[in-house]
Image (cartoon, rainbow, N blue to C red):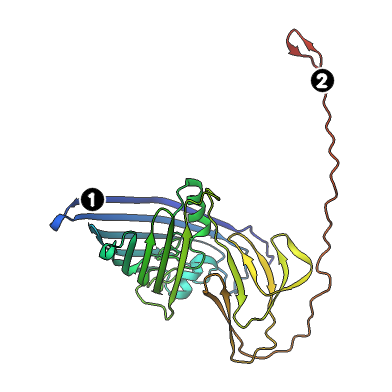
């Protein structure tokens, strides 16, 4: 059968996202608010055409999903309580498809899926024991790293939400299930700075319909954000300094501009959101069974674990010259000005 390539098409049609809130006075001077939202979405994907016997033969498919959330928020300063139920429904999933639809089916082999979960149940205490600016949040909650100190500038806030936040930890709410975090966070916030410490056990979710269960991992960290700096007004940055936990070097062969002219050995790499580097790591000095962590030296976070599971022979070597880069010459600037005579206040045609 003749195969042809189809351009990747990903069409998301959001039919509606409805939200409603109802607030009333509660007991003991509290405020009680009912929060309801419903998101309906149809997704269609067309990938490269595959063989009818392929494991991803459903290369052209679409599916429908609905996510309903109902929450109750009770506030009485300095305490706030929130509980939220979520129901997710996904229908017409492909059983041999690549992409998001295939991911849902791989985790739960059912074309039609639905599940209700406890998405949030937490208690927040502001200014405990009179400590102004301090807050403690405990329970099942949503956490987005990088948004501990939201920017005040609207443009920076959009960039922060769309590009900077959730680089390491987040609820993955693009999916129809999402993810929650069981644990707590302690934050100090004022006009000058924000310091947030957290310790969580993430739940399943994302492309897994059952998000009530906890993953067998823990995440913890501390972030510090400076706000309203006079020397750098209207700025927001997150920079990772990456290194290997065993002290081994990286071999840098490329970056955003493509391959370098030749490889370079480096001990650390500074990387910001949106940047790219091409690295080689040599594990020949490691023993079978060893683990090597990719670590951010600025925060001490372990980001990725490499496991050495077997020893192999690799005779390949890095070429001395990776690419030929033509340097820009000094440009020659020429400016030509043409002036036409004017007739009766208007420019004349040439």
Disc number for residue 22: 1
Residue that numbered label 2 is attached to = 339
Q: Quadrant of residue 310?
A: bottom right
What residue is rendered at 23% in x and 57% in y?
77
Q: Quadrant of residue 325?
A: bottom right
Quadrant where the N terminus lies?
Answer: bottom right
SS at badge 1: strand
Disc number for residue 300: none
Q: Is residue 288 above or below residue 127?
A: below
What residue is rendered at 69% in x and 88% in y?
285
Alpha-carbon neighbours of circle 2 within 10 Å: few (<14), some, or many (≥20)? few
Quadrant where the C terminus lies?
Answer: top right
- Residue 13 image offset from top left, x and y in percent: 46, 52
Front position in the image: 2 or 299: 299
Front position in the image: 137 or 230: 230
CA distance for labels 1 and 2:
69 Å
Q: Are marks 1 and 2 in contact (CB under 8 Å)?
A: no
What residue is rendered at 67% in x and 75% in y?
267
- Residue 287 image offset from top left, x and y in percent: 64, 92
What residue is rendered at 36% in x and 60% in y?
67
Which of discs 1 and 2 lies nearer the camera? The answer is 2
- Residue 274 image offset from top left, x and y in percent: 60, 59
Please report whichever mark, 1 or 2, sits nearer to the chain's N-terminal start. Answer: 1
Q: Is residue 331 above or below residue 262?
A: above
Asked if residue 179 lies left or right of residue 131, the reply is right
- Residue 39 image offset from top left, x and y in percent: 37, 55
Q: Is residue 105 above or below residue 257?
A: below
Front position in the image: 57 or 161: 161
């Amino acid at each position: 059968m003749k195969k042809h390539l189809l351009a990747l098409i990903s069409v998301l049609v959001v039919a509606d996202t409805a939200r409603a809130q109802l607030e009333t006075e509660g007991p003991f001077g509290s405020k009680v608010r009912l929060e309801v939202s419903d998101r309906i979405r149809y997704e269609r994907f067309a990938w490269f055409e595959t063989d009818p016997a392929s494991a991803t033969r459903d290369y052209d498919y679409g599916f429908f999903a609905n996510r309903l959330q109902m929450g109750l928020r009770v506030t009485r300063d300095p305490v706030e309580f929130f509980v939220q139920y979520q129901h997710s429904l996904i229908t017409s999933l492909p059983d041999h498809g690549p992409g998001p639809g295939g991911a849902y089916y791989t985790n739960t082999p059912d074309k039609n899926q639905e599940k209700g979960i406890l998405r949030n149940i937490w208690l927040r205490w502001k200014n405990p024991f009179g400590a102004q600016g301090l807050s403690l949040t405990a329970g099942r909650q949503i956490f987005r790293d990088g948004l501990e100190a939201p920017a005040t500038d609207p443009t920076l806030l959009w960039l922060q939400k769309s590009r900077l936040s959730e680089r390491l930890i987040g609820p993955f709410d693009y999916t129809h299930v999402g993810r929650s975090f069981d644990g707590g966070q302690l934050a100090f916030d004022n006009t000058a700075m924000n310091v947030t410490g957290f310790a969580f056990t993430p739940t399943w979710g994302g492309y897994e319909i059952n998000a009530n269960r906890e993953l067998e991992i823990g995440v913890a960290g501390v972030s510090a954000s400076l706000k309203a700096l006079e020397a750098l007004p209207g700025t927001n940055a997150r920079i990772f300094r990456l290194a290997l936990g065993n002290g081994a070097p990286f071999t840098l062969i490329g970056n955003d501009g493509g391959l370098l002219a030749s490889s370079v050995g480096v001990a650390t790499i500074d990387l910001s959101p949106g940047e790219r580097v091409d690295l080689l790591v040599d594990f020949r000095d490691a023993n079978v069974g060893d683990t090597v962590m990719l670590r951010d030296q600025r925060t001490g976070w372990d980001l990725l674990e490499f496991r050495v599971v077997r020893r192999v022979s690799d005779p390949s070597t890095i070429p001395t010259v990776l690419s030929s880069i033509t340097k820009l010459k000094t440009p020659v600037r020429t400016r030509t000005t043409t002036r036409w005579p004017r007739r009766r206040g208007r420019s004349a045609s040439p």
